[in-house]
Amino acid sequence: MAADNSGSRSPVPPGAPDAVADPDTVREFRLPGLDCSFTRLAGPLPIHRAQVTRAQWRAAASIVRSLGGRLVTLWGIDRRTSDGHFAVAVAYALNTGLVWLDLPLTDADTTSYPDLTATFFSAVRMQRAVADLSGLTAAGAGDARPWVRHAAWPADYYPLRREPSGRERFAALDEQYPFVTVEGDGVHEIAVGPVHAGIIEPGHFRFSVVGEKVLRLEERLGYTHKGIEKRFEAMRLAQGTRLAARVSGDSTVAYGWAYCAAAEALCDGAVPERAQWLRALALERERIANHLGDLGALGNDAALSFGLAQFSRLREAWLRRNHELVGHRLMMDWIVPGGVASDLLASALETMREDCDAVEAQVRNLESIYDAHAGLQDRFVGTGRIDAELARRLNLTGMAARASGLQRDLRSDFGGVPYEAMQVRSARAADGDVAARVAVRFAEVYESLRLVRNLAHALPAGATLAALDEPRARGCGAGWIEAWRGEVLVTIELDDRGLILRAHCHDPSWQNWPALEHAVIGNIVPDFPLINKSFNLSYSGQDL
């Protein structure tokens, strides 16, 4: 199935009022029915922040949903040393930009906030993680099971509060996690993981099946918790750059850019245009590398090892070229606050364009083989389907959302330098199955190759790095980037000394993992690896 590269913006539900932004000022923004004052954060994308009350917290979720918006992420903050209280924050995506709402927990019940799961199902795991890490609980939430704790630390120890140093050590305890059970004649469970064959990261999958047909899947993740968000505390902005780039190795450019965008917003500094174009070039190269790898793995999971061999060869050559260009296969630490660490010569840009031509010819040939391979298509078509309505309810994001007919792509929706000049044609398919996700990957490879060519050809002259003065006072910044999986968001809050009080890094896998549980229902157990790979979600990228 071919994917459609329409580039159209996300539709607004009929009759739904828009969030309103005054085009004549960057300061005026409102949500209809919510009486609070918004401030636009510095930066290229429209990101607005406001402080809300408990009543407004719950009302805002309903308003955002009525506008056709979606939940991006939710996190907790310990501000007791500065303001004397805890807080929770939430970020919503609208067709007009990102809305960041902050709820100070200043009343008598200082560690509880209103539950959002009745409005946004994808809040469930986020709220459970906040409870484990910050000790802040969603009042009335139906699912209060631990998410990342795994009995690795005591129930009254909260790593993201001020008191823990992160160096504490505890004896490991046995954990009896209460999986949801399915009962009935012939129903039995298959436990897969958390340790898997090969190099895949740990994750537990509990299948309830009749024969080989899957009735239900429940995931248990959180085995790779590393304490990254704790490590950010008390860092200077420049120090945090290297840590952010290591949140997820397959998205180092996306996280590096998002963090630097947040830092630059706090410094209120301008990034040279050439540097912004080079960042986009790196982001598209990262997108291509990951899609090449996954297209090969998808062929292999459907018994076409030839596909794995060919796409692995292309990906390896692509990564080696990255090393030649910027000194690292994954382009780690090339994006820095104020720009990029080094420039690219004209000869390197020409080589890059030649590579794009060669890779595209080979990928198109491989796509024709995939499309004509009856065994492959038999495994792909109709497998692991997520329709548009379910994708919308689950807040699906990125490539997976576009394969289910939703047009969500920050590059085409909001542009920014240089994407506003590139006229990005976002790929989209309608069927929401493995075949659709494969088709979108192929289309995105071609579009990213086109973007790399154009960026390399029309790269503006000028500086690649601007000096930034780190702030010495409180402030907030955010960076929002369309990574290859979906939208990556990094928010940074500084304390009174200009040190990081809280840095929150959000991976799109948070929204998409629950979709996998739905996609596998009604399929057979042997199709799970194929469905899983068609999403290729991150374990450690969301387990910080």
Image (tube, grey):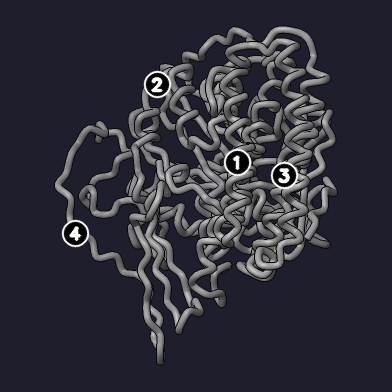
Q: Which residue matches tag 1?
A: 290
Q: What residue type is labelled 1?
A: Asn
Q: Mark 4 or mark 2, which is nearer the start of the sequence?
A: 4
Closer-to-camera residue (417/516): 516
CA distance separating discs 3 and 4: 43 Å
Find out whether the residues at labels 2 and 4 contact each other: C-beta distance under 8 Å.
no
How packed mark 2 is, by other alpha carbons closer than 10 Å (few <14, some 14-19, many 20 or more), is: some
Residue 174 badge: 4
- Label 1 residue SS: helix
Q: Quadrant of the N terminus?
A: bottom right
CA distance separating discs 3 and 2: 32 Å
Residue 409 badge: 3
Residue 235 badge: 2
CA distance separating discs 3 and 1: 17 Å
**Image height check: is 429 above or below 130?**
below
Residue positioned most to the front: 306
Q: Mark 2 or mark 3, which is nearer the start of the sequence?
A: 2
Circle 1 or circle 4, nearest the eye? 1
Q: Mark 4 or mark 3, which is nearer the start of the sequence?
A: 4
Q: Which amino acid does label 3 sit on?
A: Asp
CA distance separating discs 2 and 4: 35 Å
Q: Which amino acid does label 2 sit on?
A: Met
CA distance separating discs 1 and 4: 37 Å
- Label 3 residue SS: loop
Name the residue: 56% across, 25% down: 331
Q: Mark 2 or mark 1, which is nearer the start of the sequence?
A: 2
